[in-house]
């Protein structure tokens, strides 16, 4: 895989081997194109996508293919989008969970796109110059129609994500009401303007730390949040309007009508998730008793401690607005065993929304 990526950086798409080259054609107004297709087993396909919106030579997308799928099929399939977290990529879900087995007998196409380690699933502010990277435009206005045109993706969609991807899942559902039939967030960074009052991380701290993984200036993402984070002047809000535009909590009213699943831990990791996939092809259902609704956060996992505060406030906001959501608040940390557990727990809801 690494060798192929290096080749893509230096070799024009037209000179790729015939069995690796995708169709370079694209429709007017959509500059994204597939420059390579790489089969990974019988029912997994990686696509290398070239788009000026990504600020990179290529970005990968991993597809889990349903039974009977082909590019020439007469039908389409409902689509589950799975979004990676900070520092992640298109391989995270298949490398760290049993999502292949989970989706194997479902009539669904699973799409796992790569963004960047600090994308925030947003069109970046870039000091008010905008331009690339423009991740929301790339994913929803370029990649989505490309998959629907050439890879038999249907218009029945659900979206789920972890951590930064949980932010992405809910912000996409709010920004484009009706585009997704359901949305799930696992340990999602759902309140970028969250302010810790007891010494923990605040929301802007996450954006700043995330930018370090990309070697990028954090102010490029959404600008500066202003008061009360980097100034003592209540009138100095800087680009706080943009932080609110990209906040699931601030845009919560737009989630009305979308089935929602929220899961998060309290930062206490003693005892682990109390669940595992096991040795078979079918996992045990996570017990509802795991959702203990802790009244306060713990201190063992500082990231999930902040996630706890963010989600508690989003949950309260949804309640104020009378917007229903399935919520599982439990003991736990910011790690894959908890996220896989919640993927399994939420999967029936996501599939039901898709009719899969």
Image (cartoon, rainbow, N blue to C red):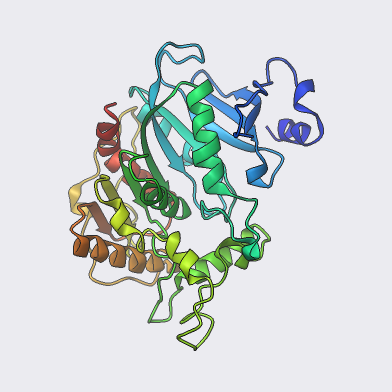
Which x, y percent locates residue 301? Answer: 42, 66
Q: Residue furthest front?
A: 28
| Near-viewer residue (232 or 261) | 232
Lateral position of residue 107 relative to residue 83, left or right: left
Residue at x 36%, y 64% (from the top left corner) = 250
Residue at x 36%, y 66% (from the top left corner) = 310
Which x, y percent locates residue 43? Answer: 48, 21
Which x, y percent locates residue 223? Answer: 57, 68
The quadrant the C terminus occupies is top left
Decide if residue 98 is in sight here.
no
Q: Residue furthest bottom?
A: 232
Decide if residue 305 is in sight here.
yes
| Near-viewer residue (110 or 200) | 110
Residue at x 34%, y 45% (from the top left corner) = 177
Quarter of the image for residue 5 reads top right
Q: Is residue 289 above or below residue 45?
A: below
Quarter of the image for residue 98 reads top left
């Amino acid at each position: 895989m690494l060798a192929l990526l290096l080749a893509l950086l230096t070799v024009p798409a037209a000179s790729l081997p015939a069995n690796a080259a995708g169709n370079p054609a694209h429709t007017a107004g959509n500059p994204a194109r597939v420059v390579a297709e790489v089969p990974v087993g019988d029912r997994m396909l990686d696509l290398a996508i070239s788009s000026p919106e990504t600020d990179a030579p290529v970005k990968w997308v991993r597809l889990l293919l349903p039974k009977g799928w082909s590019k020439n099929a007469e039908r389409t399939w409902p689509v589950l989008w799975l979004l990676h977290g900070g520092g992640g990529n298109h391989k995270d879900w298949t490398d760290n969970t049993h999502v292949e087995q989970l989706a194997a007998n479902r009539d669904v196409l699973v799409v796992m796109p790569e963004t960047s380690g600090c994308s925030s699933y947003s069109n970046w502010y870039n000091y008010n110059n905008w331009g690339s990277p423009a991740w929301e435009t790339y994913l929803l206005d370029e990649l989505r129609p490309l998959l629907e045109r050439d890879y038999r993706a249907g218009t029945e969609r659900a979206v789920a994500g972890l951590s930064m991807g949980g932010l992405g899942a809910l912000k996409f559902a709010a920004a484009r009401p009706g585009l997704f039939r359901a949305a799930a967030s696992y340990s999602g960074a759902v309140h970028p303007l969250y302010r810790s009052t007891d010494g923990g991380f605040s929301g802007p701290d996450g954006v700043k730390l995330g930018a370090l993984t990309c070697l990028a200036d954090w102010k490029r993402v959404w600008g500066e949040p202003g008061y009360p984070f980097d100034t003592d002047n209540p009138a100095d809000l800087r680009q706080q309007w943009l932080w609110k535009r990209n906040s699931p909590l601030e845009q919560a009213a737009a989630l009305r009508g979308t089935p929602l699943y929220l899961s998060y831990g309290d930062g206490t990791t003693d005892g682990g998730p109390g669940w595992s996939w096991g040795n078979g092809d079918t996992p045990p259902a996570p017990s509802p008793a795991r959702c203990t609704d802790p009244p306060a956060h713990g201190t063992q996992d500082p990231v999930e401690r902040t996630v706890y505060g963010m989600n508690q406030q989003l949950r309260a906001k949804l309640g104020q607005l009378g917007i229903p959501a399935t919520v599982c608040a439990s003991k736990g940390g910011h790690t894959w065993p908890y996220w896989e557990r919640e993927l399994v727990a939420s999967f029936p809801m996501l599939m039901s929304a898709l009719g899969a």
